[in-house]
Image (tube, rainbow, N blue to C red):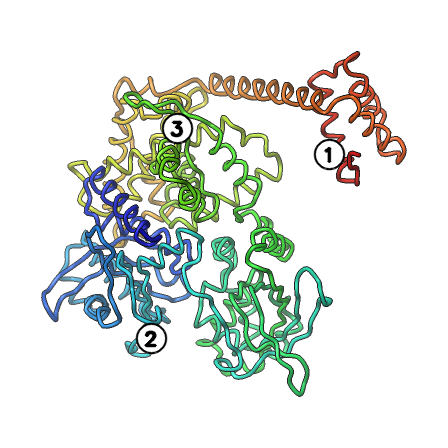
């Protein structure tokens, strides 16, 4: 069995399991699973399910989802259609099979632009809401993007093709097939390499100045890129140019700048001196010699890590100030970073290039200390088996795409069975999942409803600010309580579709709103949800289950009954006003709801006990390490530090104790200080003989 077949088998098993557990159709489970990949890869900012099918034969209409309000996405209207084959074997389709799948979506778009079609539908119908949104925003739509997602393998050439225009609005389509999803899930790489050929596609090679010495660890170049070329490049590749891990960061903070636009329109020749330019990375560049000197004729996998405002503003000028673009030029600092070093190097480039932002873009990278710590906890913290189960288990935190599937793939069949018991697939969670769990519990369901990437951007901003002040709160107990929130969230996801009041749609919104409401109502000066009982039991107590379902029914009412003048329920759920309405509702929880709560002081006491236990354990481990290294080693450290005058009086005193073992034995506090001193000495060049 090859990797694609193995991926398909696991994917279908997951989809069927999710469909059976939640009582939903497999195609809906497929959409929910893959929509997250579309947003994470930057194909769309958000992907909301909105299923509709009508008509027959050549008049058939179909839509499965849309990409939110185009006014929030640079005027791009994104529409999604599913091609789902419920098969145990990998199915294929070619370019000739695409029109029968896409044409119903194109027909839907044409119909949806008419008030006659919209008004023929019930207002609760997702098609009504998408149609109403299209009618309201069509004057602002600059491009239509059709996305075909499929669990079959696409064997046609090219995954992006331009279609005919509707009026003066261009339409493009792209395919996300089984193979593309498999590439993304294994490595985060969803497409073939993006090669920008300046000579062939954008007029001419770019003059460049090499800014690194021959043999340097990294190649660097300085370029001046014409505004027309930059706008054309962004128009073609869009969000793929924005580094994946900071895309949401840039989108959250770098809306098209009015000042930059004003300069383009009124003083385009001053754009270069006024603008700070771009910082970018690439996997590789191809250089040529011209009569005017060195030039770059192609760049592989260009990523803009600082300059989203500049890029977005110049792209907007294609429509608003096209005649000024020939006089606009932008400087670019380009660094060639080998793919095997990108995770270490690119975050630092982004961090230093984005110093004007209050929260560094590096806070979003998978190798930020926060993510590394959560990953370490997830590999080490064992949770006792649920009632009726035999095996203890762990939750697997995937801080970067592909960790889980690749860790499992390296094992033998026997080892895979052991791995599956230790890390059940249902206990896999990602950075965006973590953000959903936390923000749902902390009363921000309207932000969660805005989509995985936008929610993660806001969450990371909070984490970045808190972490920079102190990282001590993110300890093992914090992690265990995070898992409690995950258990609540995942339980609700499964149970909401089974409720008699559930009519289909808005499950994600209902789940986050219900969880937020119960946590909000439970929190007071004296009491909070008893999260510690949940992670110990690895299940949601019955009384809390009833409270959550009561809140879920109310959330359904609030979301599907927006105020007058508001028609799109998915967009309504993204508003602060929607959450305010939900918060103000009074719910009559059962009398035993109090059994789900614990005193705030009890929760704090558990935190203090956990910290004390951790401190004691760390002290014992430090003392053991100091003893293992032995007195001769510490004599060497002491002599090296004395000779170079690198030791404080306290360092000297403690190292002398370590060097006199076993006559004197350092305490746990002294041992921790000695190891800290050793680390400092090693940083300054100490090496044991």
Q: Could you tell me how far apart the alpha carbons at marks 1 and 3 are, in whole angstroms?
A: 34 Å
Report x, y in % for residue 55: 10, 64
Q: Which residue is mark 1?
A: 679
Report x, y in % for residue 345: 61, 54
Residue situated in front as seen by the camera: 558 or 149: 149
Which residue, as the protein is rendered here, is positioned at the far bottom?
291
Secondary structure, mark 1, is helix
Q: Which mark is residue 393?
A: 3
Secondary structure, mark 2, is strand
**658 vs 413: above or below:** above
Report the quarter where the C terminus lies: top right
Report x, y in % for residue 646: 85, 34
Residue 74 visible to the viewer: yes
Residue at 45% of width from left, 43% of height from top?
431
Q: Which residue is mark 2?
A: 162
Q: Could you tell me how far apart the alpha carbons at marks 2 and 1 are, in whole angstroms?
A: 58 Å
């Amino acid at each position: 069995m090859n990797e694609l077949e193995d991926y398909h088998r696991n994917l279908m098993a997951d989809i069927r399991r999710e469909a059976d557990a939640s009582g939903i159709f497999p195609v809906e489970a497929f959409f929910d699973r893959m929509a997250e990949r579309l947003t994470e890869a930057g194909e769309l900012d958000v992907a909301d399910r909105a299923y509709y099918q009508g008509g027959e034969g050549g008049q058939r209409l179909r839509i499965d989802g849309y990409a939110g309000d185009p006014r929030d996405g640079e005027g791009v209207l994104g529409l999604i259609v599913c091609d789902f084959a419920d098969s145990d074997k990998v199915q294929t389709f070619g370019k000739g099979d695409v029109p029968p799948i896409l044409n119903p979506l194109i027909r839907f778009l044409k119909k949806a632009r008419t008030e006659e079609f919209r008004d023929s539908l019930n207002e609760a119908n997702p098609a009504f809401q998408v149609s109403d949104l299209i009618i309201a925003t069509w004057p602002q739509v600059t491009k239509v993007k059709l996305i075909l997602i499929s669990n079959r393998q696409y064997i046609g050439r090219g995954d992006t093709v331009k279609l005919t225009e509707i009026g003066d609005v261009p339409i493009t389509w792209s395919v996300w097939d089984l193979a593309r999803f498999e590439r993304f899930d294994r490595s985060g790489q969803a497409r073939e390499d993006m090669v920008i050929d300046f000579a062939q596609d954008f007029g001419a090679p770019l003059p460049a100045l090499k800014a690194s010495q021959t043999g340097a660890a990294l190649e660097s170049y300085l370029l001046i890129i014409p505004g027309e070329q930059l706008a054309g490049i962004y128009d073609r590749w869009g969000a793929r140019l924005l580094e994946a891990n900071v895309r949401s960061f840039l989108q959250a903070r770098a809306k098209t700048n009015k000042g930059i636009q004003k300069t383009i329109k009124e003083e385009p020749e001053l754009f270069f001196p006024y603008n700070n330019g771009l910082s970018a990375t690439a996997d590789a560049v191809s250089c040529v010699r011209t009569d005017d000197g060195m030039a770059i004729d192609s760049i592989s996998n260009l990523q803009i890590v600082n300059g989203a405002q500049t890029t977005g503003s110049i792209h907007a000028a294609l429509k608003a100030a096209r005649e000024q673009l020939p006089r606009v030029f932008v400087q670019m600092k380009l660094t060639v970073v080998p793919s095997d070093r990108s995770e270490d190097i690119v975050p630092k480039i982004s961090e230093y290039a984005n110093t004007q932002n209050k929260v560094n873009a590096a806070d979003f990278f998978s190798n930020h200390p926060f993510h590394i710590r959560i990953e370490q906890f997830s590999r080490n913290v064992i949770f006792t088996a649920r009632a009726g189960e035999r095996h203890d288990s762990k939750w697997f935190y995937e801080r970067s795409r592909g960790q889980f599937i690749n860790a499992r793939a390296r094992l033998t069949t026997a080892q895979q069975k052991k791995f599956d018991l230790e890390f059940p697939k249902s206990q896999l969670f990602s950075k965006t999942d973590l953000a959903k769990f936390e923000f749902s519990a902390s009363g921000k369901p309207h932000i969660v409803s805005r989509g995985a990437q936008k929610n993660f951007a806001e969450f990371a901003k909070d984490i970045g600010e808190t972490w920079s002040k102190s990282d001590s709160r993110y300890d093992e107990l914090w992690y265990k309580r995070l898992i409690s929130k995950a258990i609540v969230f995942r339980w609700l996801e499964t149970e909401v579709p089974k409720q008699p009041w559930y009519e289909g749609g808005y499950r994600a919104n209902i789940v986050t709103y219900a969880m937020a409401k119960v946590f909000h109502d439970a929190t007071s000066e004296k009491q909070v949800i008893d999260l510690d009982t949940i992670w110990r039991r690895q299940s949601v107590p019955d009384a809390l289950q009833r409270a959550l379902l009561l809140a879920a029914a109310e959330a359904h009412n609030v979301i599907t009954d927006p105020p007058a003048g508001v028609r799109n329920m998915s967009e309504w759920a993204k508003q602060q006003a929607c959450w305010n309405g939900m918060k103000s509702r009074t719910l009559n929880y059962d009398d035993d709801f109090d059994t789900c709560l614990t005193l705030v002081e009890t929760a704090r006491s558990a935190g203090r006990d956990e910290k004390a236990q951790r401190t004691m354990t760390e002290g014992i481990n430090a003392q053991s390490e100091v003893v293992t290294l032995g007195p001769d080693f510490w004599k060497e450290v002491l002599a090296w530090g004395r000779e170079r005058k690198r030791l404080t009086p306290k360092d000297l005193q403690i190292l002398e104790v370590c060097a006199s073992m076993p006559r004197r034995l350092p305490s746990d506090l002294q041992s921790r200080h000695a190891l800290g001193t050793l680390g400092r000495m090693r940083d300054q060049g100490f090496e044991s003989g």
